Amino acid sequence: MVISLNIGIIGIQGAISEHVHLMNKIFKINHINGKIFFIKNKFEIKSIDALIIPGGESTTISKFLLNFGIYDEILNRINENDLPIMGTCAGCVLLSNEIANETKEISLLKAMDMKVIRNAFGRQRESFENDIFINVLEKPFNAIFIRAPIIEKVWGKCDVISKIDNNIIMARQDKYLALSFHPELTNDLRIHEYFLEIIEDHLK
Ligand code: GLN
């Protein structure tokens, strides 16, 4: 178990404080001397042990990352194979290699071998929740979807972890975890705990 840990979260929009709240709960339960804080500038990327990219609009988040030089710093750490990242919803889009309904406005981090479709559930189902089965968890997880993407396909070293109606909604590739839903909007800690395991494996 790691004793001290710094997790950064891209903090411009979306349900960010909920991620912070869940992660702090986990630190407390596990007696981890952990800190989770909003990334405000590119210099902070160098010192974090892990990163969370939350939901929001991937176009807006991508612009923010580019404009403040944060994008390049994250890419450096990805190239050094040195930064566990969890991306939820818009974060999932940013971690992908390709967008099916291509938008030129989004600069992808291309950390994961997957292709996503943005806002893929259609208007009637813009937001909904569902009990889903996740390969790495024993019991179902109540997943909340808000204008969620679908992972159309994965390849290479990217593994599917969960599907809904045969659509991929969660994937992992080494130290990267992508989810099309919002685990921070529940009180269920299991996905954040799973991400913590990934971080701990990486730091070993
Ligand atoms: N539709 C958003 C996008 O593609 C994601 C929505 C969300 O993060 N809740 O950027």
Image (cartoon, rainbow, N blue to C red):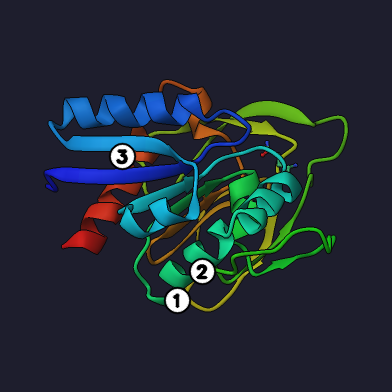
Q: CA distance from mark 2 to mark 1?
A: 6 Å
Which mark is first along the chain, 2 or 3?
2
Q: Which mark is residue 112?
A: none
The amino acid type of the residue labelled 2 equals Leu
Choose top left, top right, bottom left or bottom right for residue 108. bottom right
Say which quadrant the C terminus sits in.
bottom left
Element carrying mark 3: helix
The amino acid type of the residue labelled 3 equals Glu
According to the image, label 1 marks what residue? Answer: 79
Q: From the viewer's perspective, is the residue at label 1 or at label 3 nearer? A: 1
According to the image, label 2 marks what residue? Answer: 75
In this rendering, is residue 50 above or below 175?
above
Circle 3 packing at 10 Å, graded few (<14), some (14-19), many (20+), is: some
Q: CA distance from mark 3 to mark 2?
A: 25 Å
Q: Which mark is residue 193?
A: 3
Ligand 1: does it lie within 8 Å of the C-beta at label 2? no
Which residue is situated farthest in the right direction here?
123
The amino acid type of the residue labelled 1 equals Asn
